[in-house]
Amino acid sequence: MTTHCKDYDFRQIEPKWQTFWAENNLFQAEKTSTRQKYYAMDMFPYPSGAGLHLGHCENYVIPDIMARYKRAQGFNVLYPIGWDAFGLPTENYAVKTGRHPVDVTKENIATFTRQLKAIGISYDFSREINTTHPAYFKWTQWIWLQLFKRGLAYVEDKPVWWCPALGTVLANEEVIDGKSEVGKHPVERRPLRQWVLRITAYADRLLEGLDKLDWPDSTKRMQKAWIGRSEGSNVEFDIDCHDGERLRVFTTRLDTLFGATYMVIAPEHPLADQLTTTEQKEAVAAYAKTASAKSDLERTELAKDKTGVFTGSYAINPANGEKIPIWISDYVLVSYGSGAIMAVPAHDERDFEFAEKFGLPILQVIAPQDNSVVELPYVDKGDAVHLINSGDRNGLTPKEAQQKLAAHFSSENRGGFTVQYKLRDWLFSRQRYWGEPFPIVWVSESDYYKAIANAKLPLPETPVSYTIDGVIRFALPLPENALPLSLPEVSSYEPTGIGESPLAAMTEWLEIWHEPNTGKSVPATEPCPDEHWVLARRESNTMPQWAGSCWYYLRYLDPQNSDAIASPEALEYWGTPDIYVGGAEHAVLHLLYARFWHKVLFDLGVVPTDEPFTKLFHQGIILGEDGEKMSKSRGNVANPDEVIEKYGTDSLRLYLMFLGPLEAMKPWNPRGIEGVHRFLQKLWRICVDSEGNPNPKITDTAGDSDEILKVLHKTIRKVGDDIEHLRYNTSVSQMMILVNQLQKASEINKSTITSFLKVLAPFAPHITEELWSRMGQGGSITTSTWPNFDQKFLTKNESKLVFQINGKYRGDKILPLDISEKTAIEEAKSHIKVSPHLEGKEIKRAIYVPGRILNLVVV
RNA sequence: GCCCGGGUGGCGGAAUUGGUAGACGCAGCAGACUCAAAAUCUGCCGUAGAAAUACGUGUGGGUUCGAGUCCCACCCCGGGCACCA
């Protein structure tokens, strides 16, 4: 079974056991089991051409150790792997090389698979998934259809990032500082027809759900901030000389209404034109033009200086009937609230700045209870302040005033309490080839009604429609049984350069006769096959890369199922991951999107729970030797293949875990790995003599010293405990302490060695398999059970008592735990190092913590 | 600007949550083995000091018999958000 090497030859040992595991399918989860399940998962990789880096290794080793540990604990463990393979880099590479993305993806996956096997990750490869396989994205499309059916998908003209150099649209996250992430080309805003998902309908549930999740606080906070729930009120202002027209604002400070001395609307506000007077037309048009040319970056980060223009119109403050001017400024965002605000310069920093710049009146309406003079803007709103200059509301606290005013306006049909979110609906389409096609076709209004009359389709209550060149088009879903809708073969992945995906040029695929019941199609250039077929145009946009990763944790449960995303039995048994490990960079995007989809699936009755990831862990970043982020340009990149070649993967794994807390940023020290490598060498020599035979000092009959047994059992307990709490670094220390002890021992009982090998196995699975086998143990250490620690070696009846005089350490002594304070003081007095400090002093006070410390306060 | 997280030897990091600061490892020093080197093993390794001892966990204060750990103020580093009314 074993190799025959005399020395620790990891180059022989590691591949040997990797093959053994694969041949014996040791990591396959049982489909059904009476055993308790444990589902470990890491964020599946995007199979790039660059291969694995150390960050990946850390990411995957963390749950691997957990999975191996849980297997040893008797759990039925599911630890799967898949590929998040749609995406721009592959498509760009395909464009550049003229190769098909499918082939490029295949090649990259082969590289990743080889590397993952080389680091000994115990994935169940029989459940491997790939988001670009039609059998997988059939279900991505199916989920999308369910969203569509529930009215959660709609179409909108939205300004998006367009990169002329790349000839494509980019996602927000692909734009950094006004430039494309790839190639650093300038980008600009362009309105394009987009699919949008109504994630805002789930804002409250996404927010509330966070409370019960075992996630890093920082990530929960980020999601909370991203959702940005804000409670306030709507108020509608009448407009002077525009009878019947009202301007609605959202405010969290309704109590300051009397101090609203002007209003501001966003440049894109729908009433902007109407409110602009003839005299102001030119100025407003000029302002709107500059504002729209500004990138988001300029409008937010850089534009500290307020700009704006007067519309010429006035609103009536409903609190006091005052006429107040309506301004246009880009410090008001059209996409939040109603795109208009009431400006209260005395109590809002932004309004204050604007009013100062344009000479608008500033009226203080909130003052401290004692009416002392305060500096403006004054933003306090607690119970220690009250209203002034507010007519009959004077003297109220902000809270009281808000309630009374909201109730008043509500009765007048002029507003009332409401909630706003920062969260925007999710822009869900990309103008790319390499993504999931949308399972809909665009048809005329009459064809739509004709089609739905006889076909059984996942239809929304209100049809989704869109006007192209004055012609209205309706989104007709494909029937579910027509899925998957695959990507057509194209001759070129070259972007069209006109803001459309390469699919838009695939006329044969795009313009079709469509059979609503079956989803069958023929090119529109052919004669219409039958009278109930309709003339249709496919959607040329594709889904973003996030789509496939929104539900992959469900597909792992039952990856071959062709009738459902997974069987109800699998969904019930496996539920959701017990631990999910991945980088913090996905804190709001992937992790929020997946929660949204999961909640929709819960509402549909597809999944039994309403949260996908109950326990989440972010591994830290591995920095370069210089403490900087690893990057090719810095030349500080450590390559895992090279490290494995030099030290073996067990050393790599162990060192990555030993570096420091798993969640911390840690610099890679190429020499540091020698420490853990020596540790494994030492272990090898303890077990194997120079001829390659089992070391004769290990026998079945050897009596271990008390000291060794204590350390062994402490190690068993500590490592188990540390794994459960993801504190692997201190586990490694503890195991080193034990090995240092074992090395000094002249004889060791075999059971001590085998117990220790089991404890080390999750961290260093290859060497432990080899030594397990050389110790004459049968089978695989992978299927052995975790050792129990014996409490009798861990309970102490004596311990070191530390003597302090006035809080300073002066000596210590090993003493029974249960001695009285009096005895302890006697011991201190007779202690050779302690007694001099007591000479001629009076003991004023003694603090005695049995087994720990005796502190004598003397004068 | 706002919200988090963190500052411990030459370095990565431990510290039972208020009880000997520096576990474990890297680097370094000395010794053993060796013709020699590497590897391996043994010992030392916060600063000052011959020692006793004193001083030491970003800075300054405080609470406590006792503070890396708790409280207040400040400095620095990292992350997130950034006109969200």
Image (tube, rainbow, N blue to C red):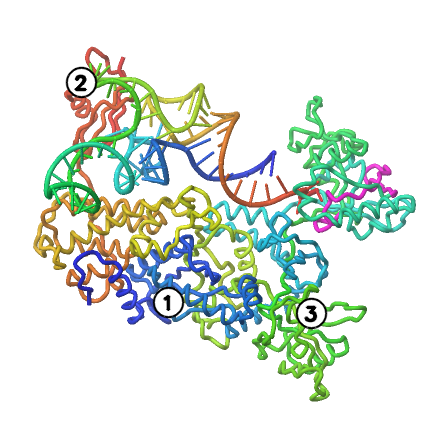
| CB contact under 8 Å: marks 1 and 2 | no
Q: CA distance from mark 1 to mark 3?
A: 42 Å
Relative depth, front residue between B31 and A821: B31
Which sits earlier in the primary sequence, circle 2 or circle 3? 3
Sequence-wise, the earlier of marks 1 and 2 is: 1
Q: Residue at x 88, y 42 (%)?
A: A312
Which disc, if any, is residue A461? 3
Of the two numbered discs 2 and 3 in the rendering, the one whose residue sits closer to the viewer: 2
Q: Are marks 1 and 3 in contact (CB under 8 Å)?
A: no
Q: Three-letter amino acid code at disc 1?
A: Asp
Q: CA distance from mark 2 to mark 3?
A: 89 Å
Secondary structure of the residue carrying numbered label 3? loop
- What residue is shown at x 43% (from left), y 51% (from top)? A617
Left or right: A155 in relation to A11: right
The quarter of the picture where residue A150 lies is: bottom right
Of tags 1 and 3, the one toward the viewer is: 1
Residue on which disc 2 sits: A835
Residue range corresponding to the magenta coloring: A312-339
Q: Is residue A411 left or right of residue A505?
A: right
The front one of A833 and A650 is A650
Residue A525's tag is: none
A76 above or below A834? below
Of helix, strand and loop, which mostly describes the magenta segment? loop
